[in-house]
Image (cartoon, grey):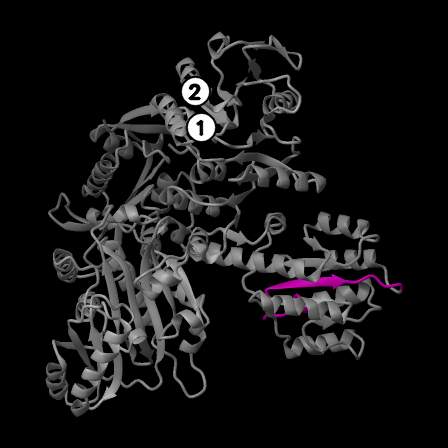
Amino acid sequence: MTTRNFDALFSPRSIALVGASAREGSVGAVTARNLLAGGFSGDLAFVNPNRARIGGQLAVASVEELSNAPDLAVIATPSASVPAIIGALADRGCRAAVIISAGDRAFRANVLQAARPRAMRILGPNCLGFISPVAGVNASFAQLTPKRGKLALVTQSGAIATAILDWAYGRGIGFSHILSMGDMLDVDFGDALDYLALDSATSAILLYVEQITSARKFMSAARMASRAKPVIVVKAGRSAGGARAAQSHTGALAGADNVYDAAFHRAGMLRVDSLGELFDAAEVLASGIRPNGDRLMIVTNGGGLGVLAADALEARGAQLAQLSEAGKAALDATLPAIWSRSNPVDILGDAGGARYASALGIVAQEPQSNGTLVMNCPTGVADNTECAQAAADARKPGKPMLACWMGEASLEAPRRIFADAGIPLFTAPEDAVRAFVHLVRFSENQRALLETPAPDPRRPSAGVEHVRRLITGALSDSRILLSAAEAKEVLSAYGLTVAAARTAPDPEGAAREAATIGAAVALKILSPDVSHKSDVGGVALNLAPNEVEAAANAMLKRVQEKAPRAHITGFTIEAMISKPQAQELIIGASVDPTFGAVILFGHGGVGVEVIADTAIGIAPLNSALARQLIKRTRVARLLDTYRDRPAADLDSVVEALIVVSDLMVNHPEIVELDINPLLVDAAGAVALDARIVVRAPEHAAPQRLAIAPYPSAWERSIVLHDGSTRKVRPLRPDDAPALMRMGARSTPNDIRLRFHGAVRTDDPLGAARLCQLDYDREMALASFAADGEASAVARVHFDPQIEHGEFAIIVRSDLQRRGLGRAMLALLLDYARSRGATTLSGDVLAENKPMQVLARALGAEIQPHENASLVRAVFQLY
């Protein structure tokens, strides 16, 4: 239900505590005390059948005796009574409840049954409660009421919530809202993110996560929230306990924690390792610092401090910036002769404010640097306050700076100076470096959200249908493992180059096939019960044709000894492929129980699990996401030019990743897939071996994907008044350049009428944002002329419930008055109806009469708007 009735939770006008108590130390008593002390200005009522007054507050005996229906109810009664209380509250018109009580599965089912007919929202059960310093609400049994601030905390653990509250209170950290989620019977992380993304009282969102439910909703909400403000997450449970037995390497490698990592990365969130890091990251991100890379310049008055910082930087995967020769010369002219002459820039222990200022002024101009860490350890010959002021004054606009001032007794004034300057201050080099790396990773994630990929390849329908027939045939034969030849046929149907394979039922037939090839061959066992052939001696390489029969007989003996229960159906014979400078890679896919289809990339070969150089991505992928996935591995460096090897054809690897992603999107029967090895060199990529596991799908394809795929079903052709046709399809991320060209061919007045003001049409970042769609909640249908140029865009953005949508439309100026706008808006209305939306509305400038006429012609009612310069066109879809 997402954010429906959330106003009753986050900004209630009245609250009732059911289970209020005067018994000291009870949950009901602590919650009552917190509600009274929280500063709530609305109506507050207590319910207790045995007490007439609690904490000086009158109490009633039952929900039925409440004088008015509360917006929010807080329930702290024994679990057996909760479902009936929820039903009574819902009947009275209560719209939200916080259930502190815990209960079993039957209890939870009964609570939902009582709440859902009235769309009553439930936070909990089994939770600490809800706290909103912004609204003066402390509906919890926490030990204190936190200070008001701009951070929102959403935590699955009540114990973690109380620990964070205590820790933050002593450090003066305040909160806008704190949600203890408990068992997440109704309100979950996706709901909370949907609300907090648009909450003006919240500048950053902190999450403590144990598990995610409703992955599609979570990813949609998280991606939207991350575009609006920093979202920082601690995920409990990094162990490999979630890894499952699998038929493929990918299934074994794609453990639960690295899939969560991939999901957080894809959503633009920042994952940290500890609760302390959670607040450090929130503080440094709130500073607004955003580096454009990971190269750090360090200026310090202590060489040891610089070494510690450099070590920490390398350990976290970032790097020291290289000093230019011009920079060294400038520093030579201003620093003592024995300065370090490299980064870290050691300006020596007697450095005062003037030396800090000159050194920082120089390094700020270094072209290789993405940020500066200025460090100080206290000495008896220099004033660290003066040095702090000099550092703060030396900060250049647009150049990120962090500070590390060691010590404690002498830090009061430096703290104030850096706080006033908006420069994050740390007291240990490792903490400062960690904060810089958090900034780098966050900035990378944000850029990834808006990166424009290359044009998305379209799979020929014949290839898709051929794969469908192969899979159906295997399932009809009660097989879950495609043969090696079938697996390669699947890849080939989608356009990948594969090593051609022949099959034979026995050693004699294998020898005949090898003789036909007439060159060195690879011989492999063929069995539906053998997943990893090399593990049972089922692979022999570089065999001459006359060696194949003997090798096949020996292979049969080895396999029967090591896998006596395996049913052997024959052999696969392949011509040996010689690529002496090729790199072995693995590309695979599996289905995670939470996030659905995931894609794996990494260093391949028989030692893939031992090497453990892999990265995980969430399907579907495009070219930009595929390149990001490759960059997250160590083997990516081996694909570039080194020693005598030319660079590998990276485009072919990207294409292979997209193929695997498309296979998972288009064919829900595929549950595991390996290409291992994928050989790649400067000439391209070829799949030597492939393994595909299939099962009858439990869900339709879109439902097993955490991110809605490209909705190809909405590709259309429309006919205009003059008889010409236009192709219409959903907008894709790679359409950003076409969108910019369309804007350039529209008049400033048409742009103003569409956007209600002046908008730049030459802004690549703005165009990228418009093309990065969450197809689960957004749609932008674009029409294209025969030359591929965009001519019109009709867009809708739904509320999280997919009940109401806001629409907008623009037609290129030189193509107006041909019926294009009418056709596009009519198609958008059809789409909104298909999603189950009940209303569609759009704000139109009052002077834009043609748009109003068009809307009326298609059934809209033109209504007044609170802004006199606008009117609202409203379509009732049902």
Q: Earlier in the sequence, mark 2 or mark 1?
A: 2
Q: Quadrant of the C terminus?
A: top left
Q: Which label sits in the foreground, 2 or 1?
A: 2
Could you classify mark 2 by the number of other residues whose Cα lies within 10 Å: few (under 14), some (14-19), or many (20 or more)? many
Residue 481 visible in the picture = yes
Residue 780 sits in which quadrant? top left
Q: Position of residue 609 (x, y in %)?
A: 40, 69
Residue 77 or residue 436, whichever sits in front: 77
Q: Is disc 1 surrounded by few (<14), some (14 to 19) or many (20+) residues within 10 Å?
A: many
Inspect the image, locate mark 2, and give the three-letter code of the amino acid beneath it: Ile
| Kind of residue at badge 1 | Ile
Quick one: 318 or 111, which is closer to the camera? 111
Kindly identify which residue carries mark 1: 122
Magenta segment boundaries in residue numbering: 363-380
Q: Residue at x 64, y 69 (%)?
A: 311
Pointer 2 with pointer 1, Cβ within 8 A: yes
The dominant secondary structure in magenta is loop
- On the image, the x and y values in percent for residue 30 come to 63, 24
Magenta stretch: includes residue 367 = yes
Percent of width and height locating residue 760:
42, 50
Residue 633 occupies quadrant: bottom left
Residue 86, numbered label: 2
Q: Position of 416 compared to 504: left or right?
A: right
